[in-house]
């Protein structure tokens, strides 16, 4: 199964990718996570990406394309299938993905567009926090820890919030999404790959809509 999850910041791409990867035993390729790893390691790429991510802009297409190309062509864990979470984000990236996949003799099965209105996204983004030990995700408004300040999964008591999860950067991230990523909606619609779901519903209802699409593949 080869999927793209498309949607604005906070739509629930990471949350749903996490569910799909366990259910179907496929890998999640999140360009945002890859970039944050580079930022934490203070590599050359990380230092460059950090400034762009903090400004709500998009990292250079060529850097992102070669990052994904390397992962798709060299790692055996993608053989079973993959979920692209946060990639492609521009038409240039989408066209490069087509070329990459045809070289590998692969094709996409579906592009799931998770649609959520902007006012709800701000709340989701501003409430998001993650356990800094096991990475379990929580939210002040939608998914609190059972015991205040303690991770349900591993018992750790320290959490992190993303540097770009603030209102100012969020509105710039939304602008980047509208200007550079939304054109992918008609692009994949023309290829008859696009399925749009209502991402403003509860976690389980969004998951059920995704299952309904994936069950038919
Ligand atoms: P990235 O990490 O990809 O961020 P994003 O696209 O802005 O998406 P998010 O991770 O913020 O949101 P999400 O949709 O995954 O939501 P989540 O499931 O966490 O990219 C970060 C930056 O890296 C970019 O701005 C850019 O600079 C750079 N970058 C990355 N990829 C790039 C590329 N391809 N090209 C160029 N630059 C790139 O959910 C959010 C919150 O809502 C969570 O707390 C969750 O618990 C909650 N939630 C989820 N679903 C629901 C629900 N149904 N009901 C209630 N709450 C919910």
Image (spheres, helix red, strand yellow):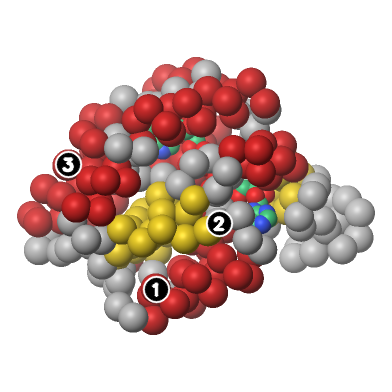
Between discs 1 and 2, the one toward the N terminus: 2
Residue 117: mark in rendering:
none
The residue singled out by tag 3 in the image is: 96
Q: Is mark 2 within 8 Å of ligand 1?
A: yes
Residue 142 image position (x, y, % from top left) = 76, 55
Measuring 44% from the left and 23% from the top, which residue is drawn there?
57
Image-based side of 73 in relation to 19, left or right:
left
Give SS at disc 3: helix
Q: CA distance from mark 3 to mark 2?
A: 27 Å
Quadrant of residue 66 within the rendered picture: top left
Residue 201 image position (x, y, % from top left) = 63, 61
Image-based side of 165 in relation to 70, left or right:
right
* Vertical order, 18 against 59 (above or below): below
Front residue of 89 and 154: 89
Measuring 59% from the left and 29% from the top, which residue is drawn there?
170
Between discs 1 and 3, the one toward the N terminus: 3
Q: Quadrant of ligand 1?
A: top right
Q: Is mark 1 within 8 Å of ligand 1?
A: no
Q: CA distance from mark 1 to mark 2?
A: 14 Å
Measuring 80% from the left and 47% from the top, which residue is drawn there?
140
Mark 3 or 2, closer to the camera: 2
Image-based side of 187 in relation to 18, left or right:
left
Residue 213: mark in rendering:
1
Residue 199: mark in rendering:
2
Quadrant of residue 151 within the rendered picture: bottom right
**In the rendered image, which quarter contains the N terminus?**
bottom left
Crowding near the residue tagged with mark 3, few <14, some 14–19, many ≥20 C-alpha atoms within 10 Å: some
């Amino acid at each position: 199964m080869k999927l793209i999850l498309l949607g604005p910041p906070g739509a629930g791409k990471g949350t749903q990718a996490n569910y799909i990867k366990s259910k179907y035993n496929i890998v999640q390729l999140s360009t945002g996570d890859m970039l944050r790893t580079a930022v934490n390691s203070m590599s050359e790429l990380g230092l460059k990406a950090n400034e762009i991510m903090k400004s709500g802009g998009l990292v250079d297409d060529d850097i992102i394309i070669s990052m994904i190309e390397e992962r798709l062509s060299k790692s055996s864990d993608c053989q079973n299938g993959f979920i692209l979470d946060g990639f492609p984000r521009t038409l240039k990236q989408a066209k490069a993905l087509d070329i990459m996949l045809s070289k590998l003799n692969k094709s996409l099965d579906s592009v799931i567009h998770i649609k959520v209105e902007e006012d709800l996204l701000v709340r989701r983004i501003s409430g998001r926090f993650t356990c800094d030990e096991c990475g379990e995700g929580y939210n002040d408004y939608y998914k609190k820890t059972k015991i205040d300040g303690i991770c349900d999964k591993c018992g750790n008591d320290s959490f992190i919030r993303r540097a770009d999860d603030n209102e100012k950067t969020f509105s710039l991230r939304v602008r980047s999404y509208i200007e550079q990523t939304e054109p992918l909606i008609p692009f994949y619609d023309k290829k008859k790959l696009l399925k749009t779901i209502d991402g403003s519903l509860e976690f389980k209802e969004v998951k059920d809509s995704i299952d309904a699409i994936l069950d038919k593949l």
